[in-house]
Amino acid sequence: MAKAPARNAPTPPAVPNRERPSEPERFKASKEQLLEFYRQMLLIRRFEEKAGQLYGLGFIGGFCHLYIGQEAVAVGLQSALDGEKDSVITGYRDHGHMLAYGIDPKVIMAELTGRGAGISRGKGGSMHMFSTEKKFYGGHGIVGAQVSLGTGLAFAHKYNEDGGVAMAYFGDGAANQGQVYESFNMAELWKLPIIYVIENNQYAMGTSVNRSSAEDQLYKRGESFRIPGIQVDGMDVLACRGAAEEALAWVRAGKGPIILEMKTYRYRGHSMSDPAKYRSREEVQSVRDKSDPIEAVKRELETMGVTEEQLKPLEAEIRKIVNESADFAEQTPEPDPAELYTDVLVETY
Amino acid sequence: MAIELKMPALSPTMEEGTLAKWLVKEGDVVKSGDILAEIETDKATMEFEAVDEGMIAKILVAEGTDNVKVGTVIAMIAGEGEDASSAAAAPTPASQQTEPTPEPAADKAPETGTAQLTAAVEKTRPADPAVPAGTEMVKTTVREALRDAMAEEMRADPRIFVMGEEVAEYQGAYKVTQGLLDEFGPKRVIDTPITEYGFAGVGTGAAMGGLKPIIEFMTFNFAMQAIDHIINSAAKTNYMSGGQMRCPIVFRGPNGSASRVGAQHSQNYAPWYASVPGLIVIAPYDSADAKGLLKAAIRSQDPVVFLENELMYGRSFDVPKLDDYVLPIGKARIVREGKDVTLVSYSIGVGVALEAAEKLAAEGVDAEVIDLRTLRPLDKQTVLESLKKTNRIVVVEEGWPVCSIASEIAAFVMEEGFDDLDAPVLRVTNEDVPLPYAANLEKLAMVTADKAVAVVKKVTYR
């Protein structure tokens, strides 16, 4: 006689059908490390505020996309990279990533003002800056292009067996571009060492994630390619750093690509010419009041015994660096007219 | 009634092949779908399937026979209830098979418009001054020359790899990468998914990261999906970075009209790429140039668009047997000397121009033919020097007339050689329409030697 099926048998908990990265832990920074994060984030904030000013004065032209509000992402993630071998690539909102890599603010600001001393000799501008020395590969103006290019950098790391990892930043807007998924497919197929960082600042120009994305939980966007994703508080530099460590461990172990969705927010418009009618002042103010990444570090430093008074000299030093970079960028000459014809090709034919 | 089995065309451009193996023998009963034979072309071995039912009454072409023309009757099938011997007696005797079988007109496949492009390409040409006198010459197909160029460069530089659709295990959609996987392995010869935008970006990124990619597009028509990376990412980066970030990459593949493949698969993109500063654009005609220029392209520190032509892949030309045959980028070549008129062309158009020159010679017009070889940077000097001698220029281009390479030649010749002109610069190109499929319309749409001859007569006032 057949045994009656057991009633009310407990359902076993769902187990993922493949390996997943662990839930990242918030990075436990020493006081010195946290001070350094604070310094870098403040440098980006003050630099970008100054860039906004210079734009208003007509020193900077064209498009200028500020990173204000998103500082924790670049600082937290890049602090985990090995500057000797890992590479970084991003889109046009690139000032913050360069500053987080310790590139001289003077040559960045001089590029913004289109001067010969700029890091691209004045020929790139705000969106097109590179430092091959630091393995920072730009600085790309076509939304999503850096995702395929970054996948190519990862391909080169694997090909050269140099142990390096590529980090490719893109926004919630770029996350809807087709080439992103073409790249995901190849990266997982070939187990390329790459961390895809989606900087979800909630708005692709003026279109909110909810108005543009059928799946608005962007960390899941790799699922159909078997690429795991982690959603991260992008307003918390220690959460960012912790996620980077987890992602690096995954990628360096040869498990292929991983996606980090950084939930962040930009305070300023998409670019300087953005009237920002798509969101309310109250919304922006509320984020500033409740989740500002720099204020959060300041509070954290306080619990470690660093007083506001003790931070003053650091803040003064940063203002000085930024002011000097602005002075330099205003005064250093424009490129020599002969530069018009240089660097079109490397060789002479 | 007995059914004739004819040598099939296995690709749009196949004209003959080797009947490698019979898998049936006389007396076997076959049904639709049975594999009857294996047929080899220069590209591949293919299986020949039965579509009819019946008994193999007679095999007319023995296995191992080379150069069997498409359309030749290779066997007879006797239908149900039919006498095999009568079926066997009916057709052409097997002994005639080495000769091309004259076909009844009604049976003949419509002639493709692109056939006229390659009609006269086997003509000999003056010796290349770049090759030392006495150098041994080896007949090589354009396809093999391209492969040899890649293989030689890959042996010399481990940073070079080949990536694209079907380049590895399939040995290349047009067999240009044949054998590379065997020699260099899957690390350096990489099959991609069908994802042109993606792998063009991956290749470009890899070049930025210090490698030397060769990205094969199955055809340049598909590179339209990837043109953003070719132009915005590869061509502009060195400039935008103030010379910091290089992008040494070769984008290569067949370009221009193929045969009877319709408008989306038949387009010459040379003018598109040649308009972009930051790119090198090369479009060789024969095997020696294909080899020497592809080697130069791979060595270049700049991004190169290397435009091949499917209709030329199977054509054979002399290639000098030299250890390292590399040609200079940016140098045109006079492939036929003449004094009455200069025909300027590139890629497959050079064959059309040479054929036109032969026809003109018969009428007493001595035409010079220039093969541009590199389209960016353009070798204006060679064109202007020739103009000084002939005072007349006609551009022959397998492509559309508007905003073409021909337009560019007309413009700079007017700007820089006006005083040497005794007649306007005229263009002989394809018609200004998407390429039609119908054989007669395709033929009407294409550039031809006769059209070139007619235009030359205008500028020579004959």
Image: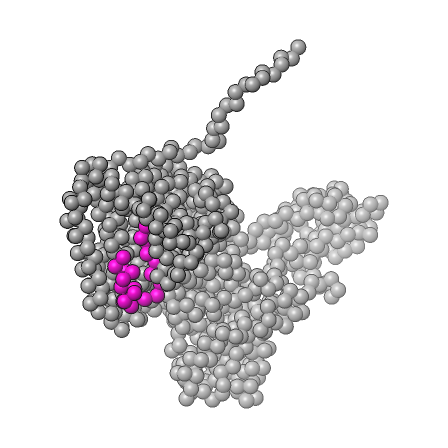
Residue A58 in the magenta stretch? The answer is yes
Whether residue B394 sits left or right of residue B325 in the image: it is right
| Model colouring | one colour
Q: Is residue A212 visible?
A: yes
Relative to the observer, which residue lies in front, B404 or A208?
Answer: A208
Per the picture, the main secondary structure of the magenta-coloured stretch is loop
For the point 47% across and 52% down, the residue is A177
Residue A151 in the magenta stretch? The answer is no
Q: Is residue B328 above or below residue A196?
A: below
Whether residue A282 sits left or right of residue A133 in the image: it is right
For the point 57% across and 61% down, the residue is B265
Percent coordinates x, y for residue A284 in the rendering: 36, 51
Relative to the observer, which residue lies in front, A308 or B433?
Answer: A308
Q: Could you say which quadrant of the image residue B451 lies in?
A: bottom right
Percent coordinates x, y for residue A279 in the rendering: 42, 54
For the point 38% across and 57% down, the residue is A270
Residue span colored magenta: A49-70
Percent coordinates x, y for residue B154 in the rendering: 38, 52
Whether residue B26 sits left or right of residue A98 in the image: it is right
Q: Residue furthest front?
A: A282
